[in-house]
Image: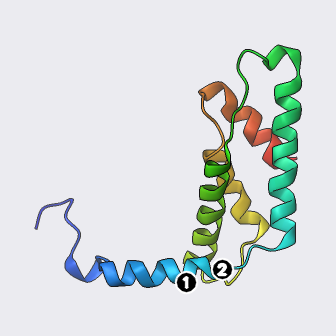
Protein backbone atom coordinates (compact mmCIF):
# COMPACT_ATOMS: atom_id res chain seq x y z
CA UNK A 1 0.00 0.00 0.00
CA UNK A 2 1.25 3.46 -0.91
CA UNK A 3 1.78 6.07 1.78
CA UNK A 4 -1.22 8.15 0.59
CA UNK A 5 -3.61 5.24 0.08
CA UNK A 6 -6.57 4.81 2.40
CA UNK A 7 -7.24 1.30 3.59
CA UNK A 8 -10.57 -0.22 2.54
CA UNK A 9 -11.87 -0.46 6.12
CA UNK A 10 -11.66 3.36 6.41
CA UNK A 11 -13.36 4.14 3.10
CA UNK A 12 -17.03 5.08 3.01
CA UNK A 13 -19.31 3.26 0.60
CA UNK A 14 -21.84 5.04 -1.58
CA UNK A 15 -24.59 3.48 0.53
CA UNK A 16 -23.05 4.93 3.70
CA UNK A 17 -22.76 8.34 2.10
CA UNK A 18 -26.39 8.18 0.98
CA UNK A 19 -27.47 7.23 4.52
CA UNK A 20 -25.39 10.03 6.02
CA UNK A 21 -26.96 12.50 3.61
CA UNK A 22 -30.42 11.53 4.84
CA UNK A 23 -29.31 11.88 8.48
CA UNK A 24 -27.61 15.23 7.82
CA UNK A 25 -30.87 16.56 6.36
CA UNK A 26 -32.56 15.67 9.67
CA UNK A 27 -30.17 17.77 11.79
CA UNK A 28 -32.10 20.68 13.27
CA UNK A 29 -31.08 24.28 12.71
CA UNK A 30 -32.32 26.18 15.77
CA UNK A 31 -33.59 29.76 15.71
CA UNK A 32 -30.41 31.10 17.35
CA UNK A 33 -28.33 29.80 14.43
CA UNK A 34 -30.76 31.19 11.85
CA UNK A 35 -30.68 34.51 13.70
CA UNK A 36 -26.88 34.46 13.54
CA UNK A 37 -27.01 33.86 9.79
CA UNK A 38 -29.43 36.79 9.42
CA UNK A 39 -27.17 38.98 11.56
CA UNK A 40 -24.14 38.12 9.42
CA UNK A 41 -26.19 38.88 6.29
CA UNK A 42 -27.12 42.27 7.74
CA UNK A 43 -23.49 42.98 8.65
CA UNK A 44 -22.39 42.10 5.12
CA UNK A 45 -25.07 44.41 3.70
CA UNK A 46 -23.91 47.18 6.06
CA UNK A 47 -20.30 46.61 5.02
CA UNK A 48 -21.25 46.76 1.34
CA UNK A 49 -23.23 49.98 1.78
CA UNK A 50 -20.15 51.83 3.05
CA UNK A 51 -18.73 54.03 0.25
CA UNK A 52 -15.18 52.74 0.82
CA UNK A 53 -16.28 49.19 -0.03
CA UNK A 54 -18.40 49.96 -3.10
CA UNK A 55 -15.71 48.80 -5.52
CA UNK A 56 -15.14 45.46 -3.75
CA UNK A 57 -18.37 44.29 -2.10
CA UNK A 58 -18.82 40.95 -0.37
CA UNK A 59 -21.36 39.09 -2.50
CA UNK A 60 -23.11 36.04 -1.08
CA UNK A 61 -25.91 34.54 -3.14
CA UNK A 62 -28.73 32.31 -1.86
CA UNK A 63 -27.16 29.16 -3.28
CA UNK A 64 -24.05 29.67 -1.14
CA UNK A 65 -26.17 30.27 1.99
CA UNK A 66 -27.95 27.00 1.31
CA UNK A 67 -24.61 25.20 1.05
CA UNK A 68 -23.40 26.88 4.24
CA UNK A 69 -26.45 25.62 6.16
CA UNK A 70 -25.72 22.13 4.81
CA UNK A 71 -22.12 22.45 6.03
CA UNK A 72 -23.32 23.50 9.49
CA UNK A 73 -25.64 20.50 9.61
CA UNK A 74 -22.84 18.22 8.48
CA UNK A 75 -20.56 19.58 11.20
CA UNK A 76 -23.17 18.89 13.86
CA UNK A 77 -23.81 15.39 12.48
CA UNK A 78 -20.12 14.49 12.38
CA UNK A 79 -19.79 15.69 15.97
CA UNK A 80 -22.65 13.44 17.07
CA UNK A 81 -25.23 16.16 17.58
CA UNK A 82 -28.85 16.30 16.43
CA UNK A 83 -28.81 20.08 16.03
CA UNK A 84 -26.44 22.79 14.89
CA UNK A 85 -24.95 24.98 17.60
CA UNK A 86 -23.31 28.39 17.53
CA UNK A 87 -19.80 26.89 17.45
CA UNK A 88 -20.60 25.42 14.03
CA UNK A 89 -21.18 28.97 12.79
CA UNK A 90 -17.46 29.68 12.97
CA UNK A 91 -17.12 27.50 9.86
CA UNK A 92 -18.78 30.32 7.93
CA UNK A 93 -15.49 32.21 8.15
CA UNK A 94 -14.14 29.89 5.49
CA UNK A 95 -17.20 30.12 3.23
CA UNK A 96 -18.10 33.78 3.01
CA UNK A 97 -15.12 35.47 1.41
CA UNK A 98 -14.34 35.81 -2.28
CA UNK A 99 -11.08 37.72 -2.01
CA UNK A 100 -8.33 37.45 0.62
CA UNK A 101 -9.05 41.05 1.68
CA UNK A 102 -12.51 39.90 2.84
CA UNK A 103 -11.24 37.18 5.17
CA UNK A 104 -10.44 39.40 8.14
CA UNK A 105 -13.66 41.40 7.69
CA UNK A 106 -15.72 38.20 7.77
CA UNK A 107 -13.78 36.92 10.79
CA UNK A 108 -14.51 40.11 12.72
CA UNK A 109 -18.20 39.90 11.83
CA UNK A 110 -18.40 36.35 13.15
CA UNK A 111 -16.52 37.15 16.34
CA UNK A 112 -18.88 40.07 17.05
Q: Is residue 81 left or right of residue 22?
A: right
> In the image shown, does 87 or 30 lie closer to the viewer?
30
Q: Is residue 109 left or right of residue 75?
A: right
Q: Is residue 33 left or right of residue 104?
A: right
Asked if the residues shown at circle 1 and circle 2 are in contact, with their CB atoms under 8 angstroms apart, the answer is yes
Q: Which residue is mark 2?
A: 27
Q: Which residue is mark 1?
A: 23
- The number of discs equals 2
Q: Residue at x 66, y 82 (%)?
A: 81
Q: Secondary structure at mark 2?
A: loop
Q: Residue at x 81, y 65 (%)?
A: 33
Q: Residue at x 87, y 60 (%)?
A: 35
Disc 2 residue crowd, few under 14, some 14–19, many 20+, Cα 10 Å: some
Quarter of the figure with residue 6: bottom left
Q: Residue at x 68, y 40 (%)?
A: 60
Up/down of 36 relative to 12, above or below: above
Q: Secondary structure at mark 1?
A: helix
How far apart are labels 1 and 2 at the CA level? 7 Å
Amino acid sequence: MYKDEISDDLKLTNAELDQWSILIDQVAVPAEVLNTVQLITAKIDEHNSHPNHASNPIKIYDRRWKKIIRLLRTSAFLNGRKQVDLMDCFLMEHCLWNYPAHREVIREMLID
